[in-house]
Image (cartoon, rainbow, N blue to C red):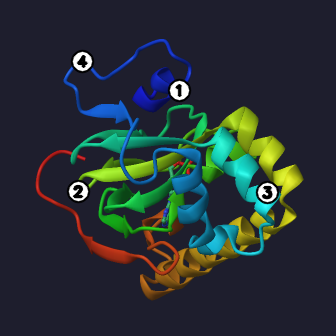
Amino acid sequence: MELISRMMDGSISYDPEGRLEPVSSGPGANQGDKIERLKDVPMFEGCSQRQLRSVARIARVFDVAAGTLLTRAGEPGDEFFLIIDGTARADVSAERHVLLHPDEFFGEMSLLDGGPRSATVVADTPLRLLVISRRHFSALLKDVPGLTEALLVTLSRRVRQAEERAERLGGGQNARGSSGAGADTVPRPPGPA
Ligand code: CMP
């Protein structure tokens, strides 16, 4: 089970190495701060004050050290992540990884189709994350129709870019080796995948 899942369901209270902690103070920690921050997130643009309040109520904020594994390709996943601060790296294939920046999200695919994680995502820098569990995510999509649209736009971009990249490579590589929506792609670091 992913570390954050265990944090979210309370089965562990903190990472044994102290790298992952729910934020109890500082920006982004309390309801008021969360709502203020959510107002600036393009994905929540168009949300009413009531909708922002419900997002702030269900979302938890976590601080994560660089190097923390957030999703592992092929494993089940139960959380949606929105980056508040810092950069995450999605390893979308053995050759390619994609950098994800503040206001970008990941983890939506497993929640939408129930399949395993499509990519391994690691904190590239220290990260502050807003995390929403599967149960709350489904309810949120029903309550805030604009979010579905935001997800579809990003997914469409990712598919389009995957297709373009596959085409550039002459169809010789799996489409998952593409970049993400508006994201940087950078060469894979040395070491095992
Ligand atoms: P999920 O499959 O739940 O977990 C891994 C996440 O990595 C996935 O959801 C997406 O959010 C993200 N991801 C997968 N492929 C790409 C891509 N090509 N570009 C950017 N992000 C991706």
Binning the other alpha carbons within 10 Å of mark 2 as few (below 14), some (14 to 19) or many (20 upward) gives some
Seen as rendered, the residue at the extreme front is 32
Distance (Cα) linking label 1 and label 4:
15 Å
Distance (Cα) linking label 2 and label 1:
22 Å
Would you identify the image quadrant in which residue 79 lies?
A: top right
Distance (Cα) linking label 1 and label 3:
22 Å
Which x, y percent locates residue 60?
A: 54, 39
Question: CB at mark 4 closer than 8 A to ligand 1?
Answer: no
Horizontally, residue 67 falls left or right of residue 110, namely: left
Mark number displayed over residue 8: 1
Mark 4: which secondary structure? loop
- Disc on the earlier residue, 3 or 2: 3
Residue plotted at (69% across, 50% down): 55
Q: Which residue is mark 3?
A: 51
In the depicted structure, whether residue 180 falls above or below residue 22: below
In the depicted structure, whether residue 57 falls above or below residue 165: above
- Disc on the earlier residue, 1 or 3: 1
Binning the other alpha carbons within 10 Å of mark 1 as few (below 14), some (14 to 19) or many (20 upward) gives some
Q: Which residue is mark 4?
A: 16
Mark 3: which secondary structure? helix
Q: Which residue is mark 2?
A: 125
Seen as rendered, the residue at the extreme top is 11
Would you identify the image quadrant in which residue 169 lies?
A: bottom left
Q: Please, what is the three-letter code of the amino acid marked with disc 3?
A: Gln
Question: CB at mark 2 closer than 8 A to ligand 1?
Answer: no
- Disc on the earlier residue, 4 or 3: 4
Q: Are marks 3 and 2 in contact (CB under 8 Å)?
A: no
Which x, y percent locates residue 75?
A: 50, 32
Q: Please, what is the three-letter code of the amino acid marked with disc 1?
A: Met
- Disc on the earlier residue, 2 or 1: 1
Task: Judge by depth and name the residue closer to the eye, 112 or 21.
Answer: 21
Q: Please, what is the three-letter code of the amino acid marked with disc 2?
A: Thr
